[in-house]
Amino acid sequence: MGNSQGQLKSSRFEAALHTSIEHSLRSHNAAPQPVFSQLYLEKDVKPGVPGVENRVTGDGAMVHHPSQPVIISHNAPQPQQLPSVLSPAQHPQQPSQPPPPPTTDTRDVPVFPGPFPATPVMPYPPGMPTPVTSGGCQEVGFCQAGADIRLTELSDKQIDVQEGFVLVGAKSPYLPENILVAAVDKRFLPDPSTNLALLGFSGNCVGCGEKGFRYFTEFSHHINLKLTTQAKKQKHLKYYVITNKQGHLVRGQAIEWKECRKRNSVPAITSAANGIPASPGSGVKMTRPALIPHKLPSHKSDSMLKDDTSQPPLKKRQRFMSTDESLFPSVRHAHGHRVPLTRPNFVPPPPTATAHDSVFINIAGCKPVILPCHGNMPLFHGNVVDVVVSPLFLDCFKLPQLMPPVLDSLGILGAPNLSVETMALISVQYLGQLGTRVPSREELDAAFLKARQETGPRDRAMQPQPPQFVTVAPAQLPWLAKTAAATSHGRVKVIVPQVSLAEGMNEAMRQISDTHPITKKPLYFVIIHVSRQRGTEFCVVVAGPIQARMLLESRFSIPECFKEISYQIITGKVHLLHTHFKRNSTENVDHDVLLDEFSNALKKNVFLPFNGKKEDKIAENLATSMTPHSVQNTTPEEFKLHPVQIAVAMKVLSQVCAIADSDQLALDLGRFSKVDLLIITAPSLVLHQQTIERVAQSGLLVDLGLEENSTVKAAEKYVMRCDKAPDTQTKFENFVSRVKAYPYTLFVLIQDQAHIDINRHSFGAQPLGLADRYINCQEVLKSANVLTLQVTPTPYVLQTKKSRLPPQNEIYMPTCVNQMTNVPPPEKVYFGLQDYIKTTEWTGRLPLLRYDPAFEQAADTLLEAYPRLYSLIIRTYLLIRQYTSALMSLSGIKGTKQETTTEAYNMLADMVNLPMKNSYGKGCMVLLRIPSIQLALLAHERLRSVRDKLGLQYRFDVLLSSMTTEFSLDDHFLSRLQSWHGRDKTWQPKTYEDLADLPCIMILSGQHTAGETWPKSLRYCDLRLVNCGVLDRTTVEQEIGLVCQYIDIENIHKAVTVCELSEEEDSDTDDTEGEEGEPEASIPTVPGNVPLPGPPALEPIAKSSLLDGDTSHRDTLSSHSQPDMSSKTQSTPMSTLEMHLKAPVDIPLRDPEPSHRIPAMSSVTDPSQVKVEDQTSESSEDKNTFADSPPPVLRIDWKLGTDEDGDEEEDTSGMDMKRLQGTPPVILVSKAAMCVLKPDAHHSADRLTYFNLPATRDTVWVSAVHPSLQPSMSNEMRSLFYRQWMEPKNYHYDYERKVENTTQPHHPRRLLLCGPHQVGKTGAFLHFARVLSRMLIRLQEVEVYDEEEINLEDIASLLLPPPPPPSPSAKWPDFELINQMSFDATVHLGRLSQVSPIHGTNMKPKSTTGAVERPTTSMMMSQYSAHNAFHHCDQCQHYKDIQLPEAQQARTHRFTFTSTMYGEDLEMQFVIPPQQEKHFVFNHSTGQLESMLLPVISEKMQVVSSPQQETNLAHNNNKGYLETMLRTVSTDKGPNAIKTPIFTPTSGRHEHGLINLFHAMGGAKHLHVLVVKQTEMMLYKKQWPNHILLVLPAVANDTGSGAAKFFIKELAYHNLELERNRQQELGVRRQDVWPFILLLDDSCVMWHCHDAGKQEDGKDTLVTLREVIEHVESTPKLSNFSMFGIRQWTSKNYTRSMQQNFSRNHLHNMVFINVDLTQNVQYDQNRYFGEEVDFNMRINSSKFVMCRFNQFSVMMKHINVGGQKEFPIHPKSGKTNQEISPQQFVCAPDSEDMTPLMATPQYLLEKYLSCMSAEKLFPLAVTNPHCPVLVVDYYIDLGPSVTVHYASSKPHSVNSEVSNLRFSGLLLYMVDSFVFAEFLKEFKFMSGAKLCLISPDRNTLRRQVVRLELEEQWRFRLRDEFQTANSPEDKPLFLLTGTHVE
C-alpha cells in the first residue's frame, strides 16, 4: 500500500522541482528559487484535517513563494474566498474583521503585492469556516476590533470620554482626507502655557472601547495608523476634536507640540477646495510626508517583478504583519470607492497613480488591464504596478431575476437565459468588432440583450425553440471562439489553457512582454478555460496601449484624476514633453529661442492695440495711452421675458396647483398670503453674481413685497452660494428662522444647477454634500410652507429608483416658442446641442461642431511615446504648444505655422486681427476649457508669457477663471471695458457677460461648469481637453451647453450643401458658380422649422487628414464635414510637428508630396479653385466611426504664398463684428466625443451613441439586463426609464432612502424644472415666483359681480306706507305692514337688464339686444366665505372629505313619487354618507328611507300629550329609535344649529361651485343637500364624498335650472307631509313642523349686513351665513310669509336701495320658500331662463306675501364654468362648428330645408322668443310700452324692446286693471284648462296685433284653437305654423301665429 503522505511529498517535490527548473531557465537570476524550504520547512500536510493549510493544488501545481516574480496561481479560491484583488466587495468576511462600509462602486482595483505566503487556494470542505488569520481588522479608519473611528462617521455620535481624557485626531498617511479619533490622557499632551508634555502615553480606543494602552506604538497598531515612520505621538496626534454648537464633533485647533528641531515644510499636493491640486507655490503646508514614487529597476525578462531581497525574513515580518491580504488598507474617497494601498515599507505616491514603473510599460507601452468575466480568478503575486484588475465586465455576466412584466417590456419573456458559453462567444465577437475603440459595459449589455431577444418566441402561443448557438457545448467553445476572433484582423487572440486560467494569463503576459519587432501584438487576449470541475471560466486581458490607458484612467473619479495630474506636475514629469520637443526641434523652430530673439528685436515696441494694420508696431508708452472711441449706446439690456419663459412659469404654477389639489393634502395654498424665496446657486462666483443681477433687474423682490427697491445689494440677501462660507450659513439660518416665524408665508427654495453637488453631507475640513445639508434638512422637508424647486439642465442624476422627486412634478422647458400654443412668432431661436449635431451634416461649409484630426493624430503619437504621463497632461501640453505656434506665426515669426493646426491658427487669427478692424478695440473671445486647475495655471502662465514676449499684450488678454476664483484683467483692458459700458473707474466686471467684445483667451478650469451665460462675442469654444476618456451624457451636455444660446432669427442663413454633380455638370459648375453662387441642396432646420445658421464664410480647414493612423487618406474639407469618408487623395506633407512627434519606438509616417501642401490659413475667394472629384472608397482594416453615405467630396486647392515658409500674407480672418453676432460659436471637441455625438450611419445598433451613453458617473445600472434609451423617447418617458433602471451610488444623498415599503416614496412639495443649457430657466423660475405670489393674492381675492340695481327712478312711490323711522323693531318685518305694500314687479337685478319690461312698472324698453358684459370687482375673501373644491385646510377637512372605506359605505336610497306635472311616477335618489344619516329617518326593519328630519317652529312644546299617543309609541319596541325621536322633538332645531335645510342646485361645477359652507356657517352643523343630475352624480360624489346628494330623475338630464327647483319644491312638500305624519304620532302639531327650505345658488360667496343707522358711509359688516339664516328664522309670524330673500351686493346706489329695511319685490339667488303655503305654486320645470321672475309673479298673483331683507346682501362670485345657463347649439349631423343663427331655431313643419339641431325644444324656443320676437312675432310692440304683449300664466322674456303684461288665469288670482289698455299681441304658452275663451275676451287688442300659440304637438295646437275660439278674432294662414328645429324623436314644440281682426 505504501505511505500516501510520502507519495504526496514526493509528488509535491517533483512538481516544485519541475517548476523551479523551468523558471530558472527563463530567469536571469543566478540563485535558484527556494523550493526545498518551501516544501520541507513547513509542517506536514494532513489531507482531510479541517483547518490545515493545503499547499498542493488539486492538479499537483505548486503555489509559488512570493519572493518569485509575479506569478498567477493555477488554482483559484471558491467564490466565498475570492481575494480582494478583484474588488473590495468580494473579499471574504472573516469573523474577526467586520466588512467595511457598503459600496456599490465597481471601479477597477489595482493588484497589490503579497510579501508573504499566499492564502490557501484549495477549497475547504462544505460547512467548514475559512481559517481565521491573525491581526484582526486591518482596514484604515477602523480599529483592530472593526469599529469605525473616522471623524466623518463619528461626528454626529455621542462619545463617553473618561475623566481626564480628551478627544484628539490622528493622521494616517494612508487616509489623508480624514482624521482618526482617539481619547488620550491630557497629561501627556502639551500644556497650553508652556507647550511641554509629560513623557509617556495613555490612550483609549473610542471605537471598541478598549482602554489602558500605555505605549503609543501599541496604540497606533490597534487603530491601524499604518505608520511609515517612527511611531511617535508628536508626529501623528495633530488636532484636538471638539463639539460645535450643533453638537457635532469637528476638528479643533492643532496640538502645539514643542519641536526640538526645525522641520522643513513640504508643499502640498492638494489644496483645500474641492480636492483641486494646489500650485507648488501656493504656500500650503503638507500635513503628511512627501510622496516619493516607488521606482523599480526595469529588466527584459518575462517575469513581472524582480526578486525583492530587501524584505525581512518571514518570521520577523509576521510579528506585526498579518498573512491576510487585507493587511494593506484602502482609502475611501469622496465618491465612495476604495483604492488599496501598497505595502507599508515605503511612502507611496497618490493611490491613483496610473503609470508607475511597470515591466510592461517599457516593453509594451502600456499596463495590461485584466477584465474578469466568469469563473474564479486566480491569485496574483508580485508588484502592484504591473497589472490592473478591472471589474468592468464582471456584472455583465450576472443575470438577475426579473419579474414577468419587466421581461415582457424587454422583449425577452419566454426567452431562455444565455449560457456562459454563449456569452463568452458574444464577448469575443464584440471585441472583434470594436476596432480601435475602448470596450464599454453598455455595449456588451446591449449585445447580450439583443442575443436574448433573438432567442425569444415570435409567437407567444408557441414554445420557444432555442437556436443552435444558445446550446453551445463547452467543448465547442474554444474553436468557436477562435473562429469568431479570426475576423478581427489580429486584434483579438483567444488562448485556451489546459490547466487553469492562471496558465492562460501567464501565456498572455509572456506574449505582451515579447519584444520581437515583427510580431503584431493583439489588442485583446481572451482566455477561456473549460473543465468539468469548475465549468467554463474566461477573462479578457486588454493589451492595446490606447485601450488599456483609457480603461486605466476611466476608473478614477475626477478628484483622483486631478491628484494624479498634480503629482506628475510637482514631480517634474511634464519636463519630459519639453525635452522631447526640444530634442526633436530644428534650430529654427525652437520656441524658447525664437521667442527670446523676437522679444529682443522688439525692444520697447509692441503691436498696435487696435484700429490699424495688424503688423504695425508702436512704442509701449503710446500703446498704454491709446483709448478707444466711446460707444454711443451704453444702456444695458433690459430684463425681458421670452414667451417660452412665461409659458413655463405658468406650467410650474399649474403643477403647484395640482399638488395643492391632490389627495395628499401636502400644500394648502389657501392659507398663504405672501411669497418669500431663497435661491441657492452652485459654488460659482460668476453664477452667483449673475443670479443676483438677474433678480435685481427683474424687479421680483418689489413685486413680492420683500424690498422697497430692486437693487443688487437688496438681492444679495436672497441669493446664496452653496459653499462653506460663514455668510452662506447665516443666510440659510435666517431663511429657516423665517420659515418657522411666518407660517402663513409660502417660502420657495430654489436650487439652481441641482446636478452639481449630490453627495451626502459630511463634516470635516473639506465638507461634502453642502447641497444635501440645505435642501434635505429636516426643517425644509417637514415644513408645510416650504416649496422646493430644483433647476437643472441635466436631471439624470436626480432621476433614479430612489429619487425624492415625484415624476409628475417634473416640468420640461421647451427650446423653441413654436412648441407652445398661443404665443407670438419668435424673435429669437434657440441653438442647442441637437442643432450643433445637425451641422455635422453640412458638406458645403464647415460644421459648427467638429474635431481637429491633426491634433488628435499628434496627441495619439505622444500618448504612445509617453505611457507614463497622464493623457490630459499630454493633450494640454500639445494644445498650448500649438496655440503658442499660432501666435508666433501671426506675429510674423517664420517657420512656426507648421507647428500648429489650422483650427488653432484660425481661432487665434480671428481673435488677434478683429480689434484692428474697428476703432473701439472690440474683438472676439476664445474659450479654452481645461478641467485641471494645475494645468490651467500652467497654460495661463505660458500663454501670457508668450503674448508678452510677442508684444501682443495690448491686443488681447489671457484670463483664468474657475468656479471659486475671480478673473482679473489687465489695466488697459479694464479701462477699455469701462469705456464701453459707460462706467466709472471703480467698476469691475464680475460676470462673463461683462466681458462682451473683449478680445481674449478665457481659460476655464474646474470639474464642473455652472451654467454661466457667456457673451455674444464668444466665437470659439475649445473642448478638446474634455471628454477624451470616459463619456457620460451629463458631462457631454454640460460642456457643449456652455455656448448654447438664443440667436436672432433675422441673422439665420440657409445652410448650403454640395450637390452631387455628374462629370458633365462639373465643368459647368466651375464656370458658372462665380455668378450664381453655390447650389442649394438641403436646409437643415431647428425645432420650429427655422433653418440652421450657416457660418459667414467657408472657414479654413485642417491641413492634416490623418485620422487615427488609418490607411485611408482624406482631403481637407472631408476631414471636417465627412470625417468618415475615404477618398483616394494625396496626403498632406509631413510637417515639422509630425517629425517632432516621432516616438522612441518606431511608428512609421507616410511620405508626403510637397505639391499638394495645404497652407493653414485662407479663404475661398476664387470659384475656380472649387471642384468636385469622384470618390472611391478604399478598404481599410478599421472603418472610421463616422461612416455616412459617400457623397462627392468638395476639394479646395489653396494658393500658396510666396514666402519660403509657405506663410500667406493676406488677411483672412474673414469675420467682422457684424458677423460675430450672427452665428453661434464654433465648438471643437475631442475625437472620442465626436465619435459618440456623430456616429457613422452604418454602425451597429449596440454601438454607444450620445443617446445611450451612461446618464452620469454618479449612478449605476440596476441590472445588467436593461434596455437602451431610444432617441424617440419623450422627456417623460426618459425620466421613467432612468427611474426604473438607474440607482444612485453609495455617496449619493438618495442612496440610503427606503422607498419600497413607504406610503409616500417621494417628497410631495418638491419640483424639478429642467431644460437645455442657456434656454432661460432663470427667467422662468423668477417669473414663477412672481405669478405664484399673484395667484396667492388671487386666491385670497374673489371676482364678484358689482352690478348696480336698475329701474330705481320711482321706487319711492311704490313704498306704501312710507318708511318708518329706524327703531330696534325694524330688524324684522311686520307682516301687516308688508302685506299693505304693493308688489314691486320691477326687475331691479342688474343681470336681468336685457329682459322684457313688465307693464305697470318703471321699466323702459330698450332697442339694444344681445349679451351685456356684467361688471365685476375683486374682493378679499374672509374667514366666513364659501369655498370650492380646491380649498383645503385642517378645519374643514372633515367637512369635505372622509376616509375611503366610509365613502364606499355611502348608501343610495331610491324613492318614487307621483308628479301631476309629468303625469307619471318619477324616481329620485338620495346618496347619503354614513356621517349624514343622522338627518334622515329610516325604517328599523327594512332600513328603507322614510323621510328627512325637520325641526319644529315653537320654542317649547309637549312631547306626548295623550294616552293614545303613548300607545302608538309603545308599538315601536325599538328603545333606541324612541330615544332618537324624543331627542329630535325635544329641541326646536334638532341636531343642527339652524332649522332650514339648504338645497343647492348645481350643474357642471363639481370643482368650482361654492359648496363648502363650513366657514360660511361658522362651523355650525347644518343640513346641506346638493341637487345634481344623474349624468353628473359620480363627479359630485367623488369630489364631495361627505355631502348628501339628491339625484334628479332621468327626465331632468337635459333640462335647465327650472326643473331642478321644481323637483326640490316638490320633494320638500312631499317630505313635509311625511314628517308631519311622523311627528304627529309623537305629539307634535302638524303646523309646528318647520315648513321652510332655502334655495341657495352655488355662486354665493360672502354675506354682508348694512345698518343704515350706524353705517352711514355705505360700508358693510361681514357676517356669516348662519347669522343671516338665524335672523330670518327669528322673524315674527314666520309662517304667514311665503318667501324671504336678500338683495344682491353692490358697491353702488346704497342710498336708494336702503330707504327701507324691507321691501316686497322680486327675490333671487338665495330664497327661503314656505313649501306649505306655496304648495300649489310651482316653478316651471321646462324653463332655462327667467324662472325666478316667473315664479315671483305667480306667488304675487296668488296673494302670497314675500319679503326682502334689504339690510342683508349676498356677494355672487363670477364663475365662468358650469351653471348651464348657455348650451352649445350645433347641427345634429355635419360640421359641429357651423354657426347657427337664431332664425334657424324655428322653421316650417316638414320643411326640407330644416337643419335639425342638437338642443332641447324648450331651449330653442326660449332663445328664439328672446331674440326674434320683436322682429318676427310682435312688431307692433317694439318700443311701445303703452301697448304691451299679453302673456297668460307665464312670464317669458321676449327681448328688451317688447313690454309684456302678465295676467293669471287661476281662480282667486290678482290681476291689475286692464280696461283702458289695448294690447299689441297675445302669447299663449302651454295653456292649461284654467284658460277659457271668456277669459281672453276680457282683453282688448289693437288692429293688426299678433297672436302666438305654443303647444307640445300639432294636434294640441289645433284643439286649443277650437277650444279658445280663437278663429273668431284671429286670422290664421297655413304658412303661419312653425316648429322648433328638432327632429321628430326630440318632440319639437309647435307655434301658430295669427293676426287680430276687428
Image: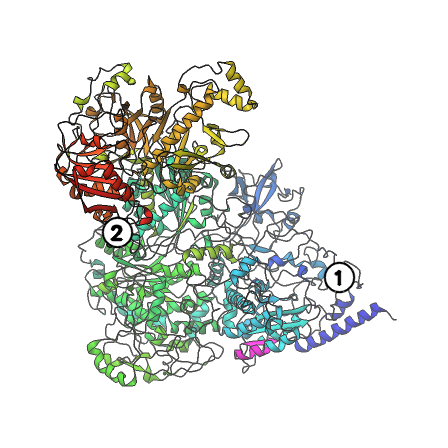
Picture layout, residue 1320 above or below residue 1086: above
Q: Which residue is nearer to you in this view: 190 or 218?
A: 218
- The relative height of residue 462 versus residue 704 in the rendered view (above or below) is below
Vertical side of 738 occupied by 1093: above or below: below
Residue 90, image quadrant: bottom right
Q: Amino acid at mark 1?
A: Glu
Instruction: Identify residue for label 2.
Output: 1790
**Residue range of the region highlighted in magenta in the rendering:** 482-499
1328 lies left or right of 224? left
Relative side of 258 to 1048, left or right: right
Indicate the quadrant containing the N terminus: top left, top right, bottom left or bottom right.
Answer: bottom right
Q: What's under tag 2, amino acid-wise?
A: Asp
- Which residue in the protein does label 1 denote? 53
The residue closer to the viewer here, 1476 or 401, is: 1476
Residue 978 inside the magenta-drawn segment: no
- Foreground mark, 1 or 2, reads 2
Residue that appears at 59% across and 59% down: 401
